[in-house]
Amino acid sequence: MDRSWRPVTAGILDIIAGVWALCWVFVLALGGGITSIISSVPQWVPALLFGLAVPFALLALLAVIGGIFAIQRRGWGLALAGSIAAFFCCFILGIVSIILAALSRNEFK
């Protein structure tokens, strides 16, 4: 089995996209918290911000976990799922990661 740089690079891109998305999740949650204490803001605004933070947090965590699996070259399905989640976190990094993970399928256990 030939070992290349592709799965490691895909994993690193997944982790970068996931951490980037987690930073935005923090911003959304903070914005939801701040807008909830301002009386002139409609009640649906904090609910929307918190509601957006939850699915993005799940996608970000999936991207990070998939990136770890890609670096370890274990579980190609989870690594590819992490790359797809990274696509929703950061478009460019996700596209490159999906391509690299798909091309390196035979390197996974």
Image (spheres, rainbow, N blue to C red):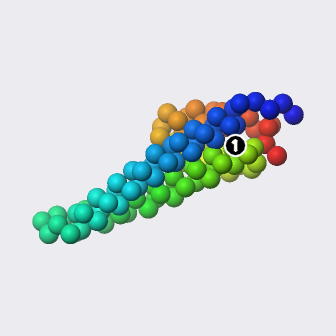
- Between 5 and 104, the one nearer to me in the picture: 5
Describe residue 82's horizontal placement relative to residue 1 as left or right.
left
Q: Residue furthest left?
A: 40
Q: Position of residue 41 (x, y in %)?
A: 17, 64
Q: Residue furthest right?
A: 1
Q: Is residue 5 above or below residue 83?
A: above
Q: Residue at x 58, y 54 (%)?
A: 62
- Between 95 and 12, the one nearer to me in the picture: 12
Q: Residue at x 50, y 48 (%)?
A: 19
Task: Give the quarter of the figure containing the N terminus.
Answer: top right
Q: Quadrant of residue 97?
A: top right
**Other residues around mark 1 within 10 Å, as few (<14) / some (14–19) / many (≥20):** many
Determine if residue 102 is in view. no
What amino acid does circle 1 point to?
A: Ile
Q: Secondary structure at mark 1?
A: helix
Q: Is residue 40 above or below residue 87?
A: below
Q: Which residue is mark 1?
A: 71
